[in-house]
Image (cartoon, rainbow, N blue to C red):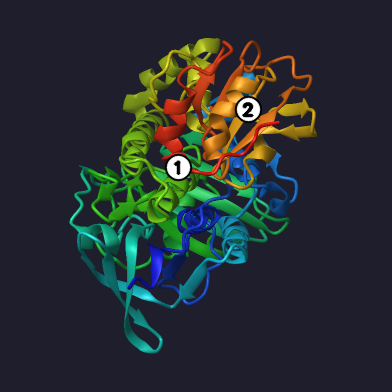
Amino acid sequence: MADTDVIVVGAGPTGLTLAGELRLGGARVTVVERLAEPTGQSRGLGFTARAMEAFDQRGLLPRFGTPETSPVGHFGGVRFDYTVLPGAHFGARGIPQSRTEAVLEEWAVELGAVVHRGWEFTGLDAGDSAVEITVRTPDGPGRLRAAYLVGADGGHSPVREAAGIAFPGTPAARVMYLADVVGRKLRPRPLGERLEHGMVMAAPLTDEVDRIIVCPDGAPPREDAAPVTFAEVADAWRRLTGEDIADADTEWVSSFTDATRQAATYRAGRVLLAGDAAHIHLPAGGQGMSTGILDAVNLGWKLAAEVTGRAHPGLLDTYHAERHPVGARLLLNTRAQGTVFLGGRESDPLRALFAELIAYDDVKRHLAGAVSGIDVRYDLGGGHSLTGGRVAHRALVGPAGETSTAQLLHPARGVLLDLADDLEIRTAAAPWHDRVTVTTAKPADDPYDELAGLNALLIRPDGHAAWVSAAPGGEGLTDALHRWFGPATDRKAVPA
């Protein structure tokens, strides 16, 4: 007998998001984490526009206070205004990853997820009907059995290795440094500054602490596994900027590389991968953590439907089919940014050409969509341009009062938005009333509204449009409901 439905290895942002999503879908979930306590360290300092939307769709944004967004960002160090694309921005900034993890763990535990800290994954045995893992705990070795296992355990993923999933890509060619420097009040360089011998960034975390990143040209990756020292970081900073910070105090020192790899498959039988376990890359544009969170939002409702017996055959396979191309595109854009921003003098012509191209609004819109994550569109078939795309936050008003697309998605159920008060549509969806919320409403007063002219819209729990209709009658709706929400229940609600 299984101890739980799903085991998640890793209590970072991806694993904790997945735990919450699985619980909303009715699955039992156990998270195992090697570290006894959160480190408090924060490589990430915010999240993308699309990740922010995903948090809004679960009602989590208020837990972050009032996140500030930046309209101006960059691509490869070339600055531009992301709001040229409606709904885009350079992300929510100034939110330490430690804060994001704390919010997500609190949420997942409130929903009933079990989190075991100080439990280290040591091996797995995957069969046709279940997967069993071995763990090292403070009380000695142990075993856990579940229907599925998800590795959300970082770029060096022991789960990925134990499952035999290949991780092809390019090895590191350079090393870069990071430090949180105390009491120096460094000149802000929030989007990075290209200097003669490399690139530096600096941004205040608090009144007393500045985050610095130093990317020297031609610095090869470290050959040993010894932790980086602040002396190395300060030396690189001095060589690039001429500023001496060697005597400063620090809260954290680390390093990273431009290694770029992606798992050959995100699913091997009963083992799945998400987040850095599935893709690693240069941290350009702050996209990595957010992409992992969105992996989890895509996977959670599908895996929950699978383990609770409500999934259409093949639903779980759509996780790899949809998210692997997103990961590949992420690796493409971060490698491109690294070439433009971090290349030496040989990249000067490319930087100059890029600066010319980015002056065009079409180019800005394309790049803003890529880095913000809001242009992700899954190939779901169907002729309407919205099908497969994300449904943006829209204020709605109907017979039941005011609501919004985000609010309707808080329970992580499907949503059928009846925009034309069409009884036939509501009747067709009635057999799925236990999985799909049917709401009759119209957009409130937004002058830019992609819902204009539509009759009805079926939204998946991850906020992507599964079916779109501009005509009455609901042709194709039943097929879409079967595909994404499984067989109809025998119980039929009477539509209002």
Residue 438 appears at what percent x and percent y? 63, 33
Q: Looking at this view, is 393 or 350 the one in front?
A: 393
For label 2, the residue is 417
Question: Is residue 391 visible to us here?
Answer: no
**Quadrant containing the C terminus in the rendered view:** top right
Q: Which residue is drawn at 50% across and 70% down?
A: 114
Give the side of residue 133 with respect to residue 472, left or right: left
Residue 135 appears at what percent x and percent y? 32, 77
Task: Tell me if mark 1 has few (under 14), some (14-19) or many (20+) residues whose alpha carbon lies within 10 angstroms of its own.
Answer: many
Disc on res. 298: 1
Residue 251 appears at what percent x and percent y? 57, 66
Q: Looking at this view, is 394 or 68 the one in front?
A: 394
Q: In this view, does 441 lie above or below 137?
A: above
Q: In which quarter of the image is residue 405?
A: top right
Disc on res. 144: none
Give the side of residue 194 with respect to residue 159, left or right: right
Q: Nearer the viewer, mark 1 or mark 2?
A: 2
Q: In this view, does 317 lie above or below 16?
A: above
Callout 2, which amino acid?
Leu
Callout 1, which amino acid?
Asn
Q: In this view, does 375 lie above or below 471?
A: below
- How far apart, in angstroms, are the residues tagged by discs 1 and 2? 20 Å
Q: Which residue is drawn at 39% across and 25% down?
A: 380
Q: Residue at x 53, y 39 (%)?
A: 432
Q: Looking at this view, is 187 or 484 the one in front?
A: 484
Residue 310 appears at what percent x and percent y? 42, 48
**Quadrant containing the N terminus in the rendered view:** bottom left
Question: Is residue 257 visible to us here?
Answer: yes
Q: Is residue 149 above or below residue 297?
A: below
Q: What element carries label 1?
A: helix
